[in-house]
Amino acid sequence: VGDVQAQDNYIACDIAVKAEIVIPLFKDGKNIGQIDIDSHTADTFTAKDERFLEWVNEKVAEIL
């Protein structure tokens, strides 16, 4: 979510959060967790960030 304040249904865990990126973690086709990162800056996460975090989750799934 690039700008959480623009979302009517967004529930922030902290009032200072302006953006959030969530990447699901899959193991054997099942969603077993997620990486969830908040930012105090709106529109801070890029497609490159998303691809990197997806790669991180792939490596984590291999370890589990």
Image (cartoon, helix red, strand yellow):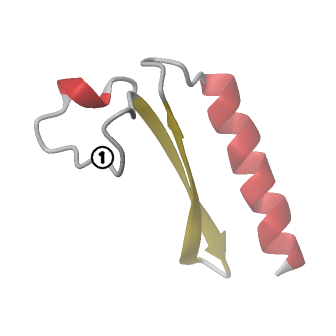
Q: For this rendering, which residue is in front, 1 or 28?
A: 1
Point out the residue furthest to the front here: 15
| Numbered circles on residues, count | 1
As drawn, 30 above or below 24: below
Q: Which residue is mark 1?
A: 12
Q: Residue at x 86, y 72 (%)?
A: 62
Residue 19 screen position, x and y as percent = 42, 30
Q: Quadrant of residue 33?
A: bottom right
Q: Secondary structure at mark 1?
A: loop
Q: Residue at x 78, y 48 (%)?
A: 55
Asked whether, in this view, residue 43 is left or right of residue 58, the answer is left
Mark 1 surroundings: few (<14), some (14-19) or many (≥20) residues within 10 A: some
Residue 22 screen position, x and y as percent = 50, 49
Asked whether, in this view, residue 28 is left or right of residue 41, the answer is right
Q: Quadrant of residue 3?
A: top left
As drawn, 18 above or below 28: above
Q: Quadrant of residue 61?
A: bottom right
Work out which quarter of the rendered image holds the C terminus and state it.
bottom right
Q: Amino acid at mark 1?
A: Ala
Work out which quarter of the rendered image holds the N terminus and state it.
top left
Q: Residue at x 67, y 30 (%)?
A: 49
Q: Residue at x 88, y 76 (%)?
A: 63
As drawn, 42 above or below 54: above
